[in-house]
Image: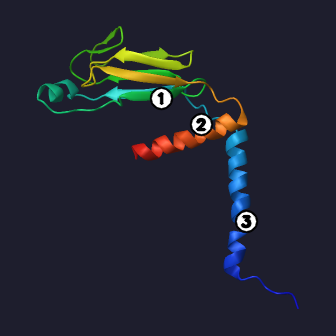
Amino acid sequence: MPMKMPRSRLLWVPLPAVALAMALWAAWAPLPIASRDQVFAIPKGTWAQRMAGDKVEILPSEIRLTLGVKDVLVLVNHDDVPQIFGPVLMMPGQSFKLPFAVASSYQFLCTAHASGQMTVIVDPQPKSPWTRLWWRIGALARSARRA
């Protein structure tokens, strides 16, 4: 008579196979590209809050983009006053699109920040399966930190 394995042990047998299948999918599946725009908005009243002494952080001090995936930075000014980003003056209600074609780290003057500057890091497009896997893991980690 064959010995029966307890049900609880049977549940653990497929877990490594499932984890391996997920890792292979993450490495080989193409990256989703619904839109290459990464949109950030400057809310109405930001300048007034800052002038009142509030420490308002509406945009991250560092924005990460990835070539071929999310490589167009879009800033929208909903505030009542003009905002400066790099060499561009955005009037109230205006938006600004900045596409990136080279992976690098960029520093910009930004009046929406208390520090007056913002860093945009553009990562290269993950082309190999392993770089796609690590890119997906990094994206998950960054979204978990924001939540």
Image quadrant in which the N terminus is located: bottom right
Kindly identify which residue carries mark 2. Answer: 135
Q: Is residue 98 found left or right of 95 in the rendered image?
A: right
Circle 3: residue type: Pro
Q: Residue at x 16, y 33 (%)?
A: 54
Which residue is label 3 attached to?
A: 14
The part of the image, by quadrant, that contains residue 69 is top right
Q: Crowding at label 1, few (<14), some or many (≥20) Cα neighbours within 10 Å?
A: some
Residue at the farthest top position: 87
Question: Which comes sooner in the sequence, label 1 or label 3?
Answer: 3
Q: Position of residue 6 (x, y in %)?
A: 71, 83
Dot placed on the residue nearer the N-terminal end, 1 or 2: 1
Identify the amino acid type marked 1: Arg
- For label 3, the crowd category at 10 Å Cα-Cα, with few meaning under 14, some 14 to 19 and many 20 or more, is few
Q: Looking at this view, is 67 or 48 the one in front?
A: 67
- Regarding mark 1 in the picture, which secondary structure is present there? strand
- In the picture, measured across the screen, residue 50 lies left or right of residue 98, that is left
- The disc label shown at residue 64, or none: 1
